Image (cartoon, rainbow, N blue to C red):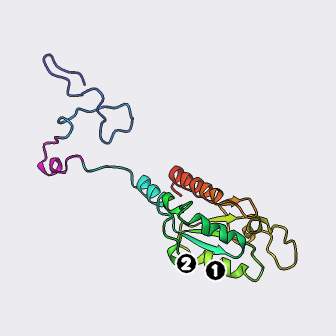
Amino acid sequence: MGLKDGQENPVAPGAVVPGARDVGERYPLQAPLGRSGDPDVDALGGAVTITKAEALVAWGRKNSLWPIPFGTACCAIEFMGTVSSVFDLSRFGAEVVRFSPRQADLMIVSGTITYKMGPILKRIYDQMCEPRYVISMGVCASSGGFYDNYCTLQGIDKIIPVDYYIAGCPPRPEAVLQAVVELQNRLQRTGA
């Protein structure tokens, strides 16, 4: 559809067409930025941000991980150092360490897990909120460590799915922070 002689083109360069399927399509701006013509919208003064619901949920999941510690040995002491004021896990959005699985979405398993503890670990994992994530902290939780005997589980991934493994005996708090940041990056990218 062409323009008639003397008719002004209503499309301003650089404006995005609402509902357009192609990013290249454009539409005319109705008013200068900050003035929409609607007094209710203008009263907000640009305080409204519009985003996709999926992006908002991904941002919320990324910045509000609630860990539940499942500590059984020396790695649990290192986890205590991670949540202390020196390393401060809370600055990465994991402020609230919960001891109830129904209020947690990140399980950090640290220490040796025996076969007797296996069903308890699985039950706690099953009671956690969806979506839930697991970090296996230290060599004992990841592969049994040097406890290759009749009573020690050779890795918690035989019972529950593990998202991140942290190597070390025991691993330093910086390694735990790195695993949490990697998980947050994954949540920001994929939303799950």
Determine the CA span between mark 1 and mark 2. 14 Å
Q: In the shown orientation, is residue 151 left or right of residue 178?
A: right
Residue kind at label 1, given as amino acid type: Arg
Using the rendered view, name the quadrant where residue 122 is placed: bottom right
Q: Which residue position is annotated with label 1? A: 123
Q: Mark 1 or mark 2: which comes first in sequence?
A: 2
Q: Is residue 165 above or below residue 152?
A: above
Q: Is residue 98 above or below residue 166?
A: below
Using the rendered view, name the quadrant where residue 164 is placed: bottom right
Magenta residues span 35-46
Residue 118: horizontal and vertical position, in percent?
72, 78
Front in this rendered view, residue 92 or 107: 92
- In the rendered image, residue 36 lying in the magenta stretch gets the answer yes
Front in this rendered view, residue 165 or 6: 165
**Residue drawn at (19%, 47%) of the image:** 45
Mark linked to residue 99: 2
**Residue drawn at (81%, 76%) of the image:** 152
Which circle, 1 or 2, is nearer the viewer? 2
